[in-house]
């Protein structure tokens, strides 16, 4: 690793502190019988801790320059399956995951695409713990009314309990990035019945299309205005309500009602 040229464009900020790596694995609730999926092995430091704590680790790394270091680690830990591949091109179905955990210090330049790829296969995961930029973590976990509350908060919280178990200071990484990071933990829940999740995601995008506008204004070209007013009244909102004032549960209620009326 001594001469390794860290690639900023691949989001290469590595963690070498064993105590921190163990704390990350613990925050991910990893157990011996688990299969863990890691995205972005880097020098394999987190991979090694995960391999010590679970039966099976499937780890993806895009950078071929790390192959030597990772294959050496593999000789010590046979329960790791390294794939030198762009995770965004992986067919998750081909991994045959059942009740797996995702635990990863992910490359930040593709945080949202990774998260949305994972949620397309939510039934395969019992938990997802990822290290992301702190402000992104706050956006994921933000509640209704919070200044970070938006599209991703609503979509993620409609299917996961989202929490931030720990902030990780920028000095903990090599090289040190410009901003602090945080762990985001997402546990699938079945609190809400969403009639069609793909349509719900588009609906939430539409609701927030112009953040400063009222919800009615954002929806008026796609839904009958009277139906929107009726749905808002049903859940106790004024016609002037803005998207960031609507709770996750009520986004789902309003969506389901409008969908039913459109049938
Ligand atoms: N897990 C290591 C750690 O905690 O020290 C490294 C984390 S580093 C933030 C992210 C890693 O993801 C880098 O090694 C980078 O090369 C890799 N990476 C970037 N894009 C990727 C992609 N599309 N698929 C798989 N790995 C990727």
Image (cartoon, helix red, strand yellow):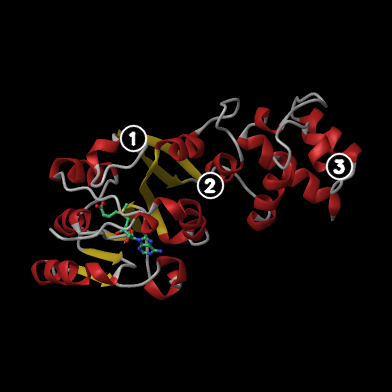
Distance of mark 2 from mark 3, alpha carbons? 27 Å
Q: Earlier in the sequence, mark 1 or mark 2?
A: 2
The image shows residue 62 at horizontal and vertical percentages of 34, 68
As drawn, 47 above or below 203: below
* Residue drawn at the location 37% of the way across and 54% of the way down: 107
* Residue drawn at the location 89% of the way across and 39% of the way down: 225
Q: Return the residue nearer the eye: 86 or 249.
A: 86
Is 242 left, or right, of 80 in this rendering? right
Is 225 left, or right, of 20 in this rendering? right
Camera-near label (1 vs 2) is: 1
Q: For residue 133, what is the image quadrant?
A: top left
Question: Badge 1 is on which residue?
Answer: 165
Q: Residues within 10 Å of mark 1 (few under 14, many from 20)?
A: few
Counting every numbered tag in the picture gives: 3
Q: Residues within 10 Å of mark 3 (few under 14, many from 20)?
A: some
Ligand 1 is in which quadrant of the figure? Answer: bottom left
Label 3 within 8 A of ligand 1 by Cβ: no
The image shows residue 185 at horizontal and vertical percentages of 38, 42
* Residue drawn at the location 77% of the way across and 35% of the way down: 215
Question: Badge 3 is on which residue?
Answer: 220
């Amino acid at each position: 690793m001594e001469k390794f040229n860290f690639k900023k464009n691949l989001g290469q900020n590595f963690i070498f502190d064993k105590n921190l790596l163990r704390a990350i694995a613990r925050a991910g609730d990893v157990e011996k019988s688990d299969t863990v999926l890691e995205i972005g092995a880097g020098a394999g430091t987190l991979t090694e801790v995960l391999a010590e704590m679970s039966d099976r680790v499937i780890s993806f790394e895009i950078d071929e320059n790390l192959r030597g270091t990772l294959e050496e680690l593999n000789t010590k830990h046979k329960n790791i399956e390294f794939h030198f591949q762009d995770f965004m091109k992986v067919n998750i179905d081909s991994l045959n995951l059942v009740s797996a955990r995702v635990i990863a210090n992910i490359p930040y330049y593709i945080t949202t695409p990774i998260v949305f790829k994972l949620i397309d296969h939510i039934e395969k995961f019992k938990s997802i713990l990822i290290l992301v930029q702190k402000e992104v973590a706050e956006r994921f976990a933000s509640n209704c009314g919070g200044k970070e509350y938006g599209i991703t908060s609503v979509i993620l919280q409609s299917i996961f309990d989202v929490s931030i178990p720990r902030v990780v200071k920028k000095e903990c990484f090599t090289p040190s990035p410009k901003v602090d990071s945080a762990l985001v933990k997402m546990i699938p829940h079945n609190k809400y019945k969403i009639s069609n999740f793909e349509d719900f995601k588009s609906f939430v995008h539409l609701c927030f299309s112009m953040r400063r506008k009222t919800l009615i204004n954002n929806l008026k070209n796609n839904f009958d205005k009277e139906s929107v007013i009726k749905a808002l009244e049903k859940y106790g909102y004024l016609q002037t309500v803005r998207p960031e004032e609507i709770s996750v549960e009520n986004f789902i209620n309003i969506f389901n009602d409008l969908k039913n009326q459109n049938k």
